[in-house]
Image (cartoon, coloured by chain):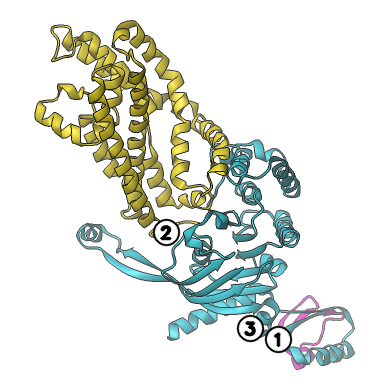
């Protein structure tokens, strides 16, 4: 695969992907609203913390944490698993496979192209809130911002690769949507999306440290709200990127094996 | 350009009878059977040929095209297209081929076809001036008008098919696999599409392998046909020879005034029809000229033609033979 033609194609791929993402305006708006769960959690946890801090989290910490969660969730979204399952079952994947562009890359572009729209609608609100309420909690050093950028990128990659890995299971079973549902249930518990991982009982927290979920959302949020010293952040980032590498290998293996079973139904 | 040796593609298919008990049983124990969609077929196609790939429903035509396009892994056998092993899906291979199916599409459903054309231009790295030339040529030939700016989901099947063809040819592939390319098109557009496919083949020296249930497509486009039935190759050769093999008789169609005497007609050949003064006779090929002379001597002939059997009849007889041979075995 030559890199030059792929790089030249990317701007058009993103532009067309964006146009496709915003083709249904009403659906787009509902979809954006559906990812505002952190705001609900924000209201819930700040009400609880108003009486007394919960562990290291006071009212302002919760506000900063869940506004950051809203931003990170918008930046790390992926739905490739449902897309892939649908396209394998209906044979639509064939159109992607006929093009001289890696199909996994085309899913990545599809997912990333929709992010600006999500970003435009919801993130300015969260940033304004964060800056006014918890400015002191945002990174004050260059490394803090660099680590945050790396953590968001790593978080998106983990989310995307897990989506592709689970979607690829549809080559082997009739549909892998239920596997994704199970993943999402575990994600809600262990990722820090609903409850900061810092508030977990120590045993459960150790488990969360070894699972990939925390590195999808929790870690970028924790770095963004300055909850780690540099060494700790670096060590957690290393774990996150280890997950990225492991998942990339898993996707490579599943994709190669799965394609052999593709039946290209229809047509 | 295309070499297929002992190609086989088998599917494992889950079988279940209707009903609640069968559904419950299938949760614990599933029964599978192996379907031999393509079973040991071999053929070669040279660069620039136009070949019709024919067979009844479920014969294995589309499966073979999908193997040749690199979408399916063969169960066994060797396949090479443009010097490549298709299932490896090398970039150089994908840049040289295109599979167009009448039922599945590459057009982006929610966007106008022009966006898919542009996307393909970027993916295939086609220079912009060549892209614009190609698209405007194709759009004019296929009378696309402002269809290219209408969201794909709002186009009719025929309109989508025309846009599919344009999207497929943006990168000027050297090998075209066309699966039912005229499906959904009106009669005049079918003719345009046939002319277009022939022109593309002649202009760019492209190899064309097409399946179609419209025999007019095959008659107009394919000097050679490959017939498969139940996954087995049953014929590979010229279309004329196939017609001659299956229906060696010619049809002598004539009209005379007054209406020809039925008894005399019977003496000239097998009478297929006799209506309103027009008679259709079935005559062995080597007796055609003698029969025509006797006919002209016997009647006041106003109109006379000598035809081969319609391709539809040839094919249905060929498929029926395949079916009866299968039943017998």
Q: Nearer the viewer, residue B270 or B66?
A: B66
Separation (CA) of disc 2 from disc 1 = 43 Å
Q: Are marks 3 and 1 on the same chain?
A: yes
Q: Secondary structure at mark 2?
A: loop
Q: Is residue B114 above or below residue B238?
A: above
Q: Secondary structure at mark 3?
A: helix
Instruction: Give residue A119's position: percent from left, percent from top.
Output: 43, 22
Q: State which region is magenta.
A: B255-281
Quadrant housing residue B299: bottom right
Instruction: Give residue A54's position: percent from left, percent from top.
Output: 14, 14
Q: Secondary structure at mark 1?
A: strand
- Chain shown cyan: that is B
Q: Which residue is mark 3?
A: B246
Tell which tag, 2 or 3, sits nearer the viewer: 2
Q: Nearer the viewer, residue B214 or B69?
A: B69
Q: Residue at x 36, y 21 (%)?
A: A71
Q: Which residue is mark 2?
A: A263
Q: Which residue is mark 1?
A: B249
Q: Chain of mark 3?
A: B
Q: Residue at x 78, y 75 (%)?
A: B276
Q: Chain of mark 2?
A: A
Q: Residue at x 45, y 53 (%)?
A: A91
Instruction: Give residue B178's position: percent from left, percent from top.
Output: 60, 60
């Amino acid at each position: 695969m030559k890199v030059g033609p792929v790089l030249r194609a990317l701007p058009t791929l993103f532009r067309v992907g964006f146009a496709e993402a915003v083709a249904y305006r009403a659906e787009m708006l509902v979809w954006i609203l559906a990812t505002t769960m952190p705001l609900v959690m924000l209201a819930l946890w700040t009400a609880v913390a108003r009486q007394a801090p919960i562990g290291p989290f006071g009212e302002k910490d919760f506000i900063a944490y869940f506004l950051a969660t809203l931003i990170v969730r918008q930046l790390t979204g992926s739905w490739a698993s449902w897309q892939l399952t649908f396209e394998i079952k209906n044979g639509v994947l064939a159109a992607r496979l006929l093009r001289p562009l890696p199909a996994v890359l085309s899913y990545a572009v599809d997912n990333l192209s929709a992010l600006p729209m999500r970003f435009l609608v919801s993130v300015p609100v969260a940033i304004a809130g964060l800056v006014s309420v918890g400015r002191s909690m945002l990174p004050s050093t260059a490394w803090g911002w660099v680590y945050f950028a790396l953590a968001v990128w790593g978080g998106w990659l983990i989310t995307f690769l897990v989506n592709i890995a689970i979607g690829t299971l549809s080559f082997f079973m009739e549909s892998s949507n239920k596997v994704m549902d199970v993943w999402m249930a575990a994600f809600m518990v262990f990722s820090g999306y609903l409850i900061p991982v810092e508030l977990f009982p120590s045993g459960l927290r150790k488990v969360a440290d070894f699972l990939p979920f925390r590195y999808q959302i929790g870690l970028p949020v924790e770095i963004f709200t300055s909850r780690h010293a540099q060494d700790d952040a670096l060590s957690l980032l290393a774990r996150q990127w280890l997950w990225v590498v492991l998942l990339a290998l898993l996707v490579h293996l599943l994709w190669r094996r799965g394609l052999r079973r593709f039946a290209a139904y229809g047509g | 350009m295309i070499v297929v040796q002992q190609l086989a593609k088998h599917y494992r298919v889950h079988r279940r009878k209707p009903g609640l008990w069968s559904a419950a049983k299938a949760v614990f124990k599933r029964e599978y059977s192996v379907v031999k969609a393509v079973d040991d077929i071999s053929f070669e196609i040279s660069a620039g040929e136009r070949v019709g790939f024919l067979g009844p429903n479920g014969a294995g035509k589309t499966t073979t095209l999908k193997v040749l396009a690199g979408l399916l892994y063969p169960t066994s056998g060797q396949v090479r297209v443009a010097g490549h092993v298709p299932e490896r899906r090398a970039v150089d291979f994908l840049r040289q081929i295109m599979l167009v199916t009448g039922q599945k599409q590459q057009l982006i459903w929610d966007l106008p076809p022009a966006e898919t054309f542009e996307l393909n231009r970027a993916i295939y790295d086609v220079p912009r001036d060549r892209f614009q030339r190609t698209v405007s040529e194709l759009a004019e030939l296929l009378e696309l008008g402002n269809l290219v700016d209408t969201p794909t989901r709002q186009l009719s099947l025929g309109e989508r098919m025309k846009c599919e063809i344009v999207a497929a040819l943006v990168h000027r592939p050297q090998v075209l696999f066309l699966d039912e390319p005229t499906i959904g098109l009106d009669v005049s557009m079918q003719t345009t599409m046939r002319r277009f496919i022939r022109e593309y083949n002649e202009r760019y020296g492209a190899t064309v392998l097409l399946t179609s249930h419209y025999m007019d497509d095959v008659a107009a486009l394919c000097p050679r046909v490959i017939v498969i039935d139940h996954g087995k190759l049953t014929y590979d050769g010229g279309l004329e020879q196939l017609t001659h093999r299956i229906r060696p008789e010619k049809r002598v169609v004539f009209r005379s005034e007054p209406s020809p005497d039925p008894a005399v007609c019977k003496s000239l050949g097998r009478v297929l029809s006799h209506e309103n003064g027009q008679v259709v006779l079935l005559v062995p090929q080597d007796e055609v000229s003698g029969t025509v002379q006797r006919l002209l001597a016997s009647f006041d002939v106003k109109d006379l033609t000598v035809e081969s059997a319609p391709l539809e009849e040839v094919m249905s007889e060929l498929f029926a033979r395949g079916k009866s041979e299968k039943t017998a075995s």
